[in-house]
Image (cartoon, rainbow, N blue to C red):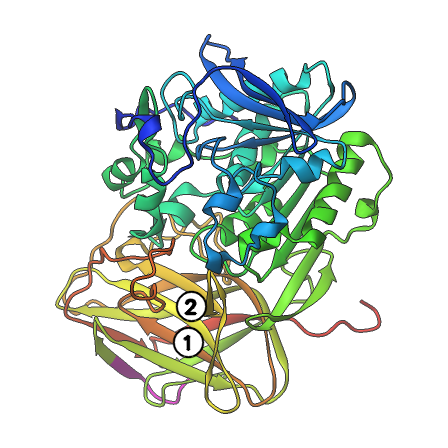
Amino acid sequence: MAAPRFAGITRPGVDPFSAKHKPPLPPADYDRRTEQGLTIERNCVIPLRDGTEIFCDLYRPEGATRDLPVLLAWGPYGKHSHSNQVFWPRSGVNPDWLSTLTPFEGPDPVWWGGHGYGVAVVDPRGAWLSGGDFYHNGIQEAEDCADAIEWLGRLDWGNGRVGMTGVSYLAAIQYLVAPLKPEPLAALNPWEGFSDWYREFAYHGGIPETGFLPRASDNIIYSLGRTENTLENVRAHPLIDEFWQSKELDLEGITQPSYCVASWSDVGLHLRGTIEAWRRMGAAQKWLDVHGQKKWAHYYLQSSRDRQLAFFDHFLRDRPTAVTAWPPVRLEVRERHGVAVERAESEFPPARTTYCDLHLDAATMRLSENPPGAASLRQYAVEGSASFDLTFDVATEVTGHAALKLWVEADGSDDMDLFVALEKIDAAGEKVGFTFYAFYEYGPVALGWQRVSHRALDSERSTPERPVHLHTREDLLEPGQVVPVEIEFWPFSTRFEAGESLRLVVAGADIYRREEGAMLPFPMHEDTRNKGAHVFHTGGEHDSVLRLPIVPERTSEG
């Protein structure tokens, strides 16, 4: 099922040779050379079905002339832009891990060449010196990528099989092209890629994302043609409509073997969508790993590369590897930044999960398994926050999806933007930090967001622990009106010891903010509708509840 085409807002491309934050852009001439043990062919021309030509760099082991599987890295950041030149120090990536030929967020041709693989790095239609106009995902890019895969499958030195691997954009393109089923595409390895454009990339709970989105839009401006103006398209379409439908994915149509990797730390971008993509894929052979580390560093770890190699050797070379013994799911249960325990599961969430309803009490600012004895309310100015605590009597693991039902009232506005967090407080009363968004160590257990006027639920997709909102209309508030709103927390996994506490924070602005002066990618929401005060009602007919997924230890029966 292909998404519809949509003619969105475009802009003239910026001269590709003017990008000062990138390495110098080589000319478009074909070039063949031997370097670092590889035969390298730069600016190979791939013809697309409409006659447009795009450029590809090919890498293969020096002297190899036949039967090589090919790994495809497809992304808009420039095939000439290499990872050891652009990763930030706080990313955790050691430059010594990478050769100077590694594409940003993609496979290192030197490492993979040493294991008998070819690597193809492609500049999509309209990106850099490739012909045509750039379209940011959608059916046009899917068809272009499928054409490139068919072309790679016909290389005289290849074995006819193509795999895809990479982080972020290089992951999301895999969801897009796989349902078209280009014949050579034999295996997918999406390493953290969102799969819902509206809910994960652009509007969190209906609140516009203002930190990463403008940056991402600026990263796709370099073209000899025109490029989609992603930021202006997002601003022009605040509700889900035909624009967003043109970005939808046929995840159920993915039938290729798939090894998906997500991170608890990538809340606000890739976490939710990677797990959802794995869950909905139609592939009979699919695996999910969810770690809690910094995403780029984790992708290039030796242990991660070993797993990638086992996966691709099995499906691209018919070699017996450990992949046949892999559990369907591997999780890191986090305790704090850098401390976690890995565990195998048969599914996600684990089938033995039970759900605990914790009731908010505005009188005591506590969470309790029992409803409050009386109704009460709490009010704060929109620049403030409120928090509710629960101290665990026994060691407790909280893993999976959580949801918060709040009864709310806006004082001085017809809408509310709510920001919620779950935090871990140690026995001494100190907040425990977790790895957060590729660079930081002070993050939360989980985050959620919700614009109250977007509170209408999709009844077919929602569950009590995982509300899904329609985002097709706005229901503004009347003065004095009290309404229930359900807020999704992005999934998480955390262990609490006896004496440690869970803290629920509700606020009118981002609870976690980028460090002053740190111009690193970061999720932000600076365009809110908040003014006046927020009022929360608890108890009685306005019972506000946090629903938590509790995972007991396995019994001897399983």
| Tag 1 residue | 504
Amino acid marked by disc 2: Leu
Quarter in which the C terminus is drawn: bottom right
| Residue 438 visible, this angle | no
- Marks 2 and 1 in Cβ contact (< 8 Å): yes
In the drawing, does residue 87 fall left or right of residue 519? right
Residue on which disc 2 sits: 404
Q: Nearer the viewer, residue 35 or 116?
A: 35
Q: Is residue 318 visible?
A: yes
Residue at left 72%, top 13%?
Answer: 156
Main SS, magenta region, reads loop
Q: Residue at x 46, y 86 (%)?
A: 430
**Image mark for residue 441:** none
Coordinates of residue 73 in the picture (x, y in percent): 57, 33
Residue 397: image location, x then y, percent: 62, 74
- Where, by quadrant of the figure, is residue 221 drawn? top left
Q: Earlier in the sequence, mark 2 or mark 1?
A: 2
Dot 1: few (<14), some (14–19), or many (≥20) neighbours within 10 Å? many
Residue 147, placed above or below residue 38:
above
Q: Which residues are magenta?
A: 370-378
Residue sitting farthest toward the top:
51
Three-letter amino acid code at the position of disc 1: Leu
Residue at figure coordinates x 20%, y 63% from the top left: 530
